[in-house]
Image (cartoon, rainbow, N blue to C red):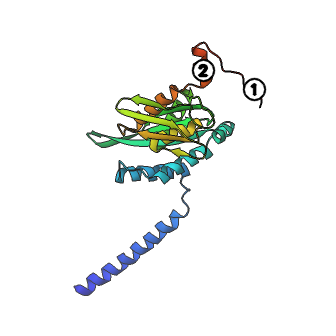
Amino acid sequence: MSDDTVNEETPEAVDITEVSGLADAEVDFEPAIDPIEEVVLEIEEAIAVEPGKVRFDKLKKAEEILRSNAPPSSRDDYENSFEKVVHINRCAKVVKGGRRFSFSALVVSGDRDGKVGFGFGKAQEVSECIKKSSEASKKSMISVNITHNTIPHPVIGEHGGARVMLRPASPGTGLIAGGGVRAVVEAAGIKDVLAKSMGSNNQANVVKATLNALEQLRTKEQIYSIRGKRLADKKAL
């Protein structure tokens, strides 16, 4: 009985290897995966493993692919503009059949010349929510007063539990800021600034507090015009 069983199992094993070989051969002829879908799958896997810690390189790669796949008419605008995905969140809804996942993205965009805005979008896919938030950020841009690549005076912005302090810096200092504050000031075109977040770490509130601080900036000419004065004419030495 043992010999019969061995003889019966061996051809089955051979058939399995042949089938697996055919399966491997067929895989080579499958169409290539779209690069944007591949990155989206990687981001979804990273979020599933570490919901609160999404790798920055995945987000950066997704932004580059979205820019490369932009229509030709808008590619010039992409080159001159700045867009950054500040935060991606995953939400799971438990239903009878299992879990349904949805994603939300917070994107900051600007022209690096005094205009900046933010957008928030939700969708069932990561790429779609990034596109929605990107379009929303372009519609809600505000103008920022910049003098000599920095801000004209210290200012504190507040929104909810977040408080952000911005101070002007000398040339060559760079952007001493991080997270959502850095994304906003970089998109606005500010090159030298000192920043400090003094409240909630919620990315959405930090971004809104930074924009509130930038809205309060006034140049010397604007302050003098409000007071009914005018600047003294500069005389040549």
The residue furthest left is: 1
Q: Determine whether 44 is above or below 143 in the image.
A: below
The residue furthest right is: 236
Residue at 56 percent of width and 46 percent of height: 174
**Count of residue discs:** 2
User: Left or right of 25: which side holds 199?
Assistant: left
Q: Residues within 10 Å of mark 1 (few under 14, many from 20)?
A: few
Dot in front, 1 or 2: 1
Residue at 34 percent of width and 81 percent of height: 10
Instruction: Identify the mark at residue 52; answer none if there is no mark.
Output: none
The residue furthest top is: 228
Residue 119 location (% of width, % of height): 49, 32
The amino acid type found where label 2 is placed reads Gln
Residue 47 location (% of width, % of height): 38, 49
- Label 2 residue SS: helix
Residue 19, picture quadrant: bottom left
Residue beneath label 2, please?
222
Quadrant occupied by the C terminus: top right
Q: Determine whether 100 is above or below 136 in the image.
A: below
Residue 106 location (% of width, % of height): 45, 37
Residue 93, picture quadrant: top left
The residue furthest front is: 237
Which of disc 2 and disc 1 is earlier in sequence?
Answer: 2
- Mark yes or no: residue 1 visible: yes
Q: Name the residue nearer the viewer: 127 or 4.
A: 127
Residue 48 location (% of width, % of height): 36, 51
Check if mark 1's residue and mark 2's residue have beta carbons within 8 Å: no
Residue beneath label 1, please?
235
Q: Name the residue nearer the viewer: 50 or 181.
A: 181
CA gap, disc 1 and disc 2: 21 Å
Q: Name the residue nearer the viewer: 122 or 234.
A: 234
- Label 1 residue SS: loop
